[in-house]
Image: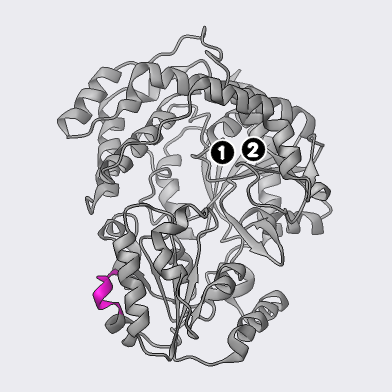
Amino acid sequence: MEPFFHRRYLTLVDEIEQRFPVVRWRRDDLEVWPLARMELYLDMYWANADRPRPEPRPFPFRSLARIARPLRNVWRSRHDLAHFVARPKPAYAMFLGDGVSLDFVDGSWRDRFCEPLIDALEKRGSTSFLMQSGDLSRLPWYRPTFAANLVAGRGYQPNASGTIPIELPGREDVVEFLERNGVHSASLDRDHLVRTANVVAATATEFERVIRIVRPTLAFVVTYYANLGHAFLLACRRRGILSIDLQHCAQEGAHKAYGWSAVPKTGYASLPAIFWNWSQTDAAAIREWTSRLERPWHRSLHGGHTQLAPFLGNSDSSAAAWDGKFEGVGAGAIFEREILIALQPISGHRAQWEALAEQIKTAPASWRWWIRRHPASSPLQDVEYAGLLSLRMANVVLEQASLLPLPALLRHMSILVSLASGSAAEAAEFGVPAIFLLDAARGPFAGLMDKGLAEVVQVSAIAGVIARTPKVPARPPPNRAPDFNATLDELNRIAGGYRELCASRE
């Protein structure tokens, strides 16, 4: 695999946005470039992995699945009907989760980033309407949840809104530029872009139906650039609803979806109006391009990590309760090192996982290994790291490593090991250093490495690095984020002006 694929992608899109008129790629009120840009990333990702990009199922099968989806949702929710939401209802705020950023806590699945805000809103007397993407494979829910796959199904129509023309000036030049740079992107084919734009526009129309019922003041989304995010944001823009993307992973000023060299005068309708960032640094990186707009179509806001705050100090009662559960694992045994392995369901790295399993077998018995499955992983993907999941040793924790929330674990860890997991940024908040097994991590996590908070290490050298790592890392001063209530007040104030801004464009 190419070590610096991510940086190469960022360099290419930066040059494309400066040299070619991609900001004018349009289908009615939908700018097409944000969609095309993510399609390009996926093409490059799969090419870098030396694997063909997965093809969608043929339309007849998708159509049958769409027809059966309401009944399938009810069937899958039959043991969780208390949290099954059949129809939207009015609420002050609506949330669209990505169906992946979930924790299984005390027997139910809850959204890592939405749940703290929903709780804060409830304490203020404000109601929320929660939607989740995905196929309802993770039940039961912690709270009533609407299955957004119903909206997705209605948006996937044959030739959806196909009579509306699409403008792609200079597309051939962009394709030629990429080919000259050794990148073949089948997704930039005109027919593919037309289909993609039509589906997003039609799905946005379906989201508008939901928004008309909910009538929210604020609309939050996790991972805006994946799944239904673009369509949801377009619907919010059409209705003049302030949309907020909740940061869900490390950005470090080098994320594939959060830096733009060229933006239309009125912004991109399929991008969030507000970017809720974990740190002032991340917010400043986004402000570098949003500040160039004449009017505030997009802006960043330092709201802090919505899940971490209670765990960074020692005074929160909920964090203390999780400390008790952590200490109860292994009957309270004390270990010299606590090592968290963040598994990632990425194919092609079985040899590295197997080598890591062998390292664990020969490591000191005084080191405890917490092997945490990714919330998005499926049993089929477990075969990639079967050697790790089959370990049965007194100093290896499997089930509890996935049942405890990530911050509850990081409070007690000595080091984090992963292929290239964004959890390294969260670990850094606790002073926990990260080991990456992939050279490709040098691209998105260069900032952490420059700060000495992460490094790329060969599996064979892991034991030596861990041995040199302090058992208890020096925890940095907490990254003091604004109080949730103050941030929500600010968003409420911005929402009114944003509604007027959207109306003035018409």
Please give left or right for residue 194 compared with residue 299 in the image: left
Return the disc, 1 or 2, that comes first in the chain's sequence. 2
Please give left or right for residue 251 compared with residue 172 in the image: right
Q: What residue appears at the point 67 percent right and 24 percent down from the top-left corner?
A: 67
- The quarter holding residue 92 reads top right
Residue pointed to by mark 1: 273
Q: Position of residue 14 (x, y in %)?
A: 29, 38
Q: Position of residue 418 (x, y in %)?
A: 39, 66
Please give left or right for residue 345 compared with residue 332 in the image: left
Q: Which residues are magenta?
A: 455-462
Q: Position of residue 80 (x, y in %)?
A: 78, 50
> On screen, 472 above or below 112?
below
Q: Is residue 11 magenta?
A: no
Q: What residue appears at the point 33 percent right and 68 percent down from the top-left corner?
A: 354
The numbered disc on residue 54 is none
Q: What residue appears at the point 23 percent right and 54 percent down from the top-left corner?
A: 3
Discs 1, 2 touching: Cβ within 8 Å: yes
The numbered disc on residue 242 is 2
